[in-house]
Image (cartoon, rainbow, N blue to C red):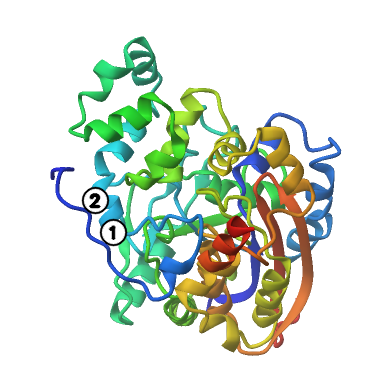
Amino acid sequence: MAKIVASVNVSHVPAIGAAWDNKKSGEPYWKPVFDGFDFSKKWIAELKPDVIILVYNDHASAFDASIIPTFALGCASEFPPADEGWGPRPVPTVIGHPVMASHIAQSLILDEFDMTIINEMDVDHGLTVPLTLMFGQPQAWPCKIIPLPVNVVQFPPPTGNRCFNLGKALKRAVESYPEDLRVVIFGTGGMSHQLQGKRAGLINKVWDKRFLDSLAGDAELARRIPFIEYVREAGSEGIEMVMWLISRGALDREVREVYRFYHVPASNTALGHLILENASFAA
Amino acid sequence: MSNDEPFRREPIEGFDDVPGTTLFDAQRARQGYHVNQFCMSLMKAEKRAEFKADEDRYLRKWPMSEAQRQAILDRNWGRMIELGGNIYYLSKLFSTDGKSFQFVAATMTGLTQDQYAQMMLNGGRPVDGNRSKSEWSAKEGK
């Protein structure tokens, strides 16, 4: 059977993609950010996942204001990089896994998570920046990727607890897929940041650390954080962190923290990165 | 969908006390629908050219309010947000202008871009003193 063995959680700041694409990754401002992923690149190269389920949010790129799915699943065979207003990022096209994605969609819907099924979609920085940080600039991404977009742009987004439970349903969906595949789930976005209003620029290191600590444990504290607390403590765009609860819910209760990295600032944002493995998993 | 309908507030407990923050909820999204869809149109190069050639004429294609159109013409980002614009949609407009997220965020806070960038380098805007409107009015009262 297929099995989710680990999670990679990482911010998806667009300026990181721009810095990489414009060959600025060695500059003093950006070097510490990219250096923070040296370990992660080696870790994932050794782990060799067959499939990544990548939880992210679209930023008014594939979806406009006319349709706003709360939870969606990319079932296409490929997903081109989106033109976000300054041309598409020069990164490989994302190759999907339509057979497995369709199985997951069916399993989730029967498990009472009513996914929107997407058969045609461009993917924006929310999905491609985490891939750049983990894999650099390959000719092709090294495995198949199933995108799972979550609405966190129009409030309210799904609650953290709902996200955590979706993660648990994803685990069941993957484990009922007959082929032996090694799956890693990515949770992206965050950490504390606010891009609008007179309070823009908000960063909360203490709160971010508490969130990371909870995820690295049983996540019981993190899954019960109410919407208003994200907004007040982590900024209006910090709400993206509910997506990290999907990736946490998809792992076992017992996990081990493999790696953590935290850096302020990446443009307007506190960059967070956390790799977890199931405690039962031996590579 | 008309933009002249009164704006309805859906209460989310505790939110009204968060200072300097606009909640892009379903009601505000409805109010800002045409502002945001106008922004989406700028993802195509030929539309960007058409907009730049005559902004007012281009904006009149969307049934938005006078106040919304004026805020866009004035590039009053804070006002656009208040009137239902969302930052990710507005990013198509400021990208058309050749501006960054950091430029626009700085503008909304009343700082120069350099001052704002320095604040971020120093660790960002601290949460202490910025959780509640009462903390802000206490500061202003000094």
Q: Residue shown at 71%/68% (left/top)?
A: A274
Q: Residue shown at 39%/19% (left/top)?
A: B48
- A233 relative to B41 in the view: left or right: right
Residue B65: x and y, percent?
22, 35
Please name the residue that numbered disc 1 is placed on. Answer: B26
Please name the residue that numbered disc 2 is placed on. Answer: B30
Residue nearer the viewer, A65 or A229: A229
Which structural element holds mark 1? helix
Residue A5: x and y, percent?
64, 76
- A204 relative to A158 in the view: left or right: right
As drawn, the label of residue A81 is: none
Tag 2–tag 1 contact (CB < 8 Å):
yes
Residue B110: x and y, percent?
59, 39
- Amino acid on which the number 1 mark rests in the picture: Ala
Does residue A275 lie above or below A42 as drawn?
below
- Name the chain under label 2: B
- Amino acid on which the number 2 mark rests in the picture: Arg
- Name the chain under label 1: B
Label 2, label 1: how far apart the Cα atoms are: 6 Å
